[in-house]
Image (cartoon, rainbow, N blue to C red):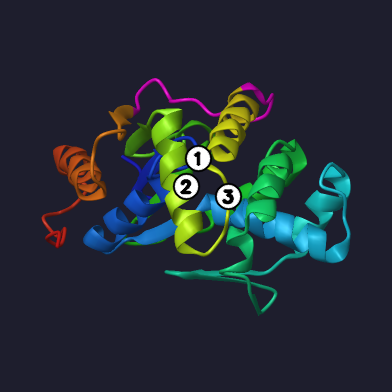
Amino acid sequence: MSTQPPVIAIDGPSSSGKGTVASKVAERLGWNLLDSGALYRGVAWAALQRGIALDDDAALASMTRQLVFDIKPGSIHIDNADVTQAIREEPISVGSSRVARLGPVRDALRIVQTGMRRPPGLVADGRDMGTVVFPSAELKVFLDASVEERARRRHKQLIDKGSNVSLSDLFASLGARDERDRSRPVSPLRADDDAVMIDTTSMSISAVVDEVLRHAVQRSLTGGGAKSGT
C-alpha cells in the first residue's frame, strides 16, 4: 500500500467541466487542488512577457525551471505577480496549448505538479494527470462532453466576462485544440484504461461532483469526511 497521500486525477478536454468539478471535489473532501492548466497558462504568460517564442522548447524549459509558482484556491502568482485573471485571456489559452506540446516544458512542470501531492490528499485536473503525472492515482476520472456543449459553456464564460467571441469560432477552436491535444506525441489527451468515464454533456456540475465522490467513497478515499454539497 502506498504511503503517499491519495490522489484523485480528473482529466478531460477543454471546457468539459474538469476544473470546476475538481475544485468542488477538493473543497468537499478538504484536500489540496492542482489546476495543471493554470501552470501551462502561466508558462505561456511568462514566455510572452519575456519575449520567448512559444516553440523554443529549450528556452521555455529553462525559464519554467526558474519560475516560482504560488497556487492557492482562486489565485495563482508567478514570481510574486498576480496572474489569476491574466492567464484566463484567450491568447494565453491558445499559447498554453502550444507550450503543452513540448516535452521539456512538461518535464519541468511535472516536478511542480508531483510536489503538490501533500496530505491529506490531492485532486489534480488536467489532460495527463492519470496517465503520466500520477499513474498510480487511487481514482482516475475522465470527463467529456460534446464539442457543441463545450463551446456553449466556453462562450457563456467569455460573454459573462465581457468578451465578444462568436460561438462558431469557439466551436472551431475547440475542435482544433481537441485534435492537437489527442494527437500530440508527448502525453496525448486520452483516458487511462482504469479511468472512470463520465459524459457531462447533460449533467449539472453538482451531479458530476456527486458522481466523482461516489466513486471516491467506493475506494474508501473520503474517510467519511466529505462535506455535504450545497
Q: What amino acid is labelled 1 in the image?
A: Ser
Q: CA distance from mark 2 to mark 1?
A: 9 Å
Q: Residue 63, percent across and down? A: 81, 59
Q: Between residues 70 and 165, which one lies in front from this camera angle?
A: 165
Q: Residues within 10 Å of mark 3 (few under 14, many from 20)?
A: some
Q: Residues within 10 Å of mark 1 (few under 14, many from 20)?
A: many
- Determine whether 139 is above or below 35 in the image: above
Give the structural element (helix, strand or loop) at label 1: loop
Q: Residue 147, percent across and down? A: 45, 30
Question: Is 192 included in the stretch rendered in magenta?
Answer: yes
Q: Residues within 10 Å of mark 2 (few under 14, many from 20)?
A: many
Give the structural element (helix, strand or loop) at label 2: helix
Q: What amino acid is labelled 3 in the image?
A: Val
The numbered mark at residue 154 is 2
Instruction: Give the number of the mark in front: 3 or 2.
Output: 3
* Secondary structure that dominates the magenta span: loop
Instruction: Give the number of the mark in front: 3 or 1.
Output: 3
Residue 124 seen from this side: no
Which residue does the image show at 83% across and 43% down from the upper left? Answer: 57
Picture quadrant where residue 137 is located: top left
Left or right side of 32 for 154: right
Q: What amino acid is labelled 2 in the image?
A: Arg
Q: Between residues 91 and 120, which one lies in front from this camera angle?
A: 91
Q: CA distance from mark 3 to mark 2?
A: 10 Å
Give, as a single range, the part of the protein colored magenta.
183-195
Which residue does the image show at 45% across and 61% down from the upper left? Answer: 160
Which residue does the image show at 32% across and 39% down from the upper left? Answer: 138
Which residue does the image show at 36% across and 53% down from the upper left? Answer: 20
Where does label 3 land, which residue?
165
The numbered mark at residue 14 is 1
